[in-house]
Image (cartoon, helix red, strand yellow):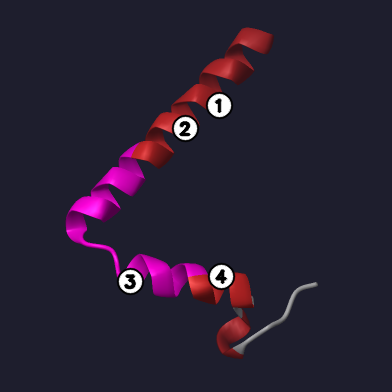
Amino acid sequence: MKVEVSGGYSVAHSAAIANVSRLSVGELRALRDACDALSARVIEGSASQE
């Protein structure tokens, strides 16, 4: 079930934005680094399956 709120964001998306806005700069950097590392693993996994 997807519930839209003002601006076209889903409730889950709005909650994620609220949570991210509470993070410190260091926590945001750590989150970005973790996302980059996961993206690199996905790319490596895709390349090894070809």
Which residue is nearer to you in this view: 36 or 1?
1
Residue type marked 1: Val
* Up/down of 22 relative to 33, above or below: below
Local secondary structure at mark 2: helix
In magenta stretch: residue 15: no
The mark closer to the camera, 3 or 1, is 3
Residue in the image at 48% along x and 33% along y: 39
Residue 27 at what x, y percent from top left?
26, 53
According to the image, label 4 marks what residue? 13
Q: Earlier in the sequence, mark 1 or mark 4?
A: 4
CA gap, disc 3 and disc 1: 27 Å
* Up/down of 7 relative to 50, above or below: below
Residue type marked 2: Leu
CA gap, disc 1 and disc 2: 6 Å
According to the image, label 2 marks what residue? 38
Instruction: Look at the numbered discs 1 and 2 and tell me whether their residues touch, using CB distance below 8 Å.
Output: yes
What span is colored magenta in the figure? 16-33
**Residue 11 visible from this viewpoint:** yes
Residue type marked 4: His
In magenta stretch: residue 26: yes
CA gap, disc 3 and disc 2: 22 Å
**How many marks can you see?**
4
Residue 3 falls in which quadrant of the image?
A: bottom right
Q: Earlier in the sequence, mark 4 or mark 2?
A: 4
According to the image, label 3 marks what residue? 21
Instruction: Look at the numbered discs 3 and 2 and tell me whether their residues touch, using CB distance below 8 Å.
Output: no
Q: Which mark is residue 42?
A: 1
Which residue is nearer to you in this view: 22 or 13?
22
Instruction: Look at the numbered discs 4 and 2 and tell me whether their residues touch, using CB distance below 8 Å.
Output: no
